[in-house]
Image: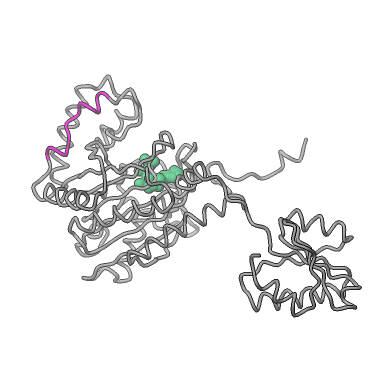
């Protein structure tokens, strides 16, 4: 037996994000967060675990997420809890619980891991990360348009300006009810053409059949009646208001009448940003209006709209397009001769950090010859090596070697050395 069989591995669909990848993650996250701040959104931090009932009541009992994908369990008190599969439900719950939604508007954003027991594949994980936002208290199409423009700006800021925008309207609950019946008769007439999944969805959640990715179903989906042609008057006016603002702002879009979302709470505006570079997992950002949800989970009647982006998919697009930035080594590596030199090295490096918090200094640890220490300095990518040996300590003059370029060797006293290292990136 090798020790391999003994080794504990991560859970399938739960990825480690290694140091080689974290710089791109950080770049994507800070870019999105800076854009949200620029539009006046405030951050809210929410728990990863909620009562299962919150998701059943908001996302919907007969959705894939609630039926098959949630990580639900009974805790030690016998309460049914679930790891959050998305952020909106928790955000609405917190908004109601803390009275954030009482007759005022709120623009909130959140970030963090979400959990769904799906089939892992490229762009699809069981733990994945979203940054999302919710706006409460505004009912007009103007905020829908602004949110779409903001998400477009996020993608451009990441260098992904070619991601496509698709929009649709899901109308009112009444219009959807009537439409659902028409849809069911259409698909029943083509029962043989449906796959098992679509046949099942037809019973539980027929609009989700439109969302099937199975190419064999595309013809029967294409010929299905369109909700867009059956919108109620108010939803039609709302949608036209939205397209007018997008047109005026010069934002291209495609109206996709088959764009439905996998969560029950949406009505009226829905939108997705889709990349052609990610295969079947092409949606990098998705959102929509959910005017009924706040009331449905116990709050006052409050209009709302939100979106969420999938960070893994954005990171993958950014990495494919721009590569992985090289992880920069420290500015300086302090090579230490003996224990007394170690004391000097730490005194020096602490003074540099006091003076210049951005300076990146690594003090050698673990003993060894000068030769082996220089090897480590080189391997960690340090720009300079500073030698603190016995003779340097005696003379008070320290040697600085350029490890990356061809600057001549320097000999500096303690104050000069601190100045030099505090100057940061050389
Ligand atoms: P999809 O159609 O790709 O399953 P969805 O409609 O289930 O997406 P949402 O619930 O709207 O997705 O989540 C918003 C975004 O979160 C998606 O557009 C996607 O970028 C990302 N996302 C959703 N599920 C996953 C997952 N399992 N792994 C990675 N990213 C995901
Ligand atoms: Mg999904």
Q: In this view, does 318 lie above or below 180?
A: below
Q: What stretch is highlighted in magenta?
A: 219-230
Q: Which of 297 and 362 is in front in this view?
A: 362
Q: Is residue 250 above or below residue 191?
A: below
> What is the residue that sits farthest to the left in this orientation?
233
Q: Is residue 325 visible?
A: yes
Q: Which residue is drawn at 21% across and 62% down?
A: 138
Q: Which colour scheme is used?
A: one colour
Residue 372 among those drawn in magenta: no
Q: Which residue is drawn at 55% across and 41% down?
A: 12
Is residue 65 something that shows in the picture?
no
> In terms of depth relative to the viewer, which is nearer, 377 or 210?
377
Q: Does the magenta stretch include residue 224?
A: yes
Q: Which residue is drawn at the image coordinates 38% and 54% (left, top)?
A: 154
Comparing 97 with 52, the one in front is: 97
Q: Is residue 280 left or right of residue 222?
A: right
């Amino acid at each position: 037996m090798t020790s391999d069989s003994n080794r504990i591995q991560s859970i399938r669909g739960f990825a480690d994000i290694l140091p080689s990848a974290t710089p791109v993650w950080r770049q994507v996250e800070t870019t999105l967060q800076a854009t949200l701040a620029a539009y006046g959104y405030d951050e809210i931090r929410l728990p990863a675990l909620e009562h299962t009932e919150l998701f059943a009541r908001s996302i919907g009992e007969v959705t894939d997420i609630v039926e098959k994908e949630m990580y639900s369990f009974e805790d030690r008190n016998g309460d049914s809890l679930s790891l959050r599969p998305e952020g909106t439900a928790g955000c609405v719950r917190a908004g109601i619980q803390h009275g954030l939604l009482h007759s005022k508007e709120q623009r909130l954003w959140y970030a963090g891991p979400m959990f769904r027991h799906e089939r892992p594949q490229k762009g699809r994980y069981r733990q994945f990360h979203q940054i999302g936002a919710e706006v409460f208290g505004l009912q007009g199409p103007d905020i829908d348009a602004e949110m779409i423009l903001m998400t477009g700006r996020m993608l451009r800021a990441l260098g992904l300006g070619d991601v496509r925008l698709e929009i649709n309207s899901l109308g009112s609950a009444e219009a959807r009810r009537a439409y659902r019946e028409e849809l069911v008769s259409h698909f029943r007439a083509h029962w043989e053409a449906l796959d098992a999944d679509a046949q099942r969805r037809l019973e539980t959640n027929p609009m989700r059949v439109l969302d099937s990715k199975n190419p064999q179903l595309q013809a029967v989906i294409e010929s299905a009646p369109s909700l867009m042609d059956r919108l109620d008057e108010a939803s039609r006016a709302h949608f036209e208001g939205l397209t007018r603002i997008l047109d005026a702002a010069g934002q291209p879009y495609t109206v996709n009448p088959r764009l439905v979302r996998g969560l029950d709470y949406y009505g009226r505006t829905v939108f997705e940003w889709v990349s052609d570079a990610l295969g079947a997992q092409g949606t990098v950002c998705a959102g929509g209006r959910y005017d009924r949800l706040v009331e449905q989970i116990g709050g006052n009647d409050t209009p709302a709209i939100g979106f969420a982006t999938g960070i893994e998919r954005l990171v993958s697009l950014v990495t494919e397009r721009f590569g992985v930035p090289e992880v920069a080594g420290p500015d300086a590596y302090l090579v230490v001769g003996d224990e007394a030199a170690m004391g000097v090295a730490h005194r020096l490096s602490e003074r540099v950090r006091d003076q210049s918090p951005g300076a990146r200094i690594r003090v050698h640890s673990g003993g060894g010859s000068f030769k082996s220490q220089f090897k480590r300095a080189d391997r960690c990518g340090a720009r300079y090596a500073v030698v603190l040996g016995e003779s340097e300590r005696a003379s008070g003059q320290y040697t600085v070697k350029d490890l990356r370029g061809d600057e001549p060797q320097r000999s500096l006293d303690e104050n000069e050395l601190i100045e030099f290292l505090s100057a940061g990136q050389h």
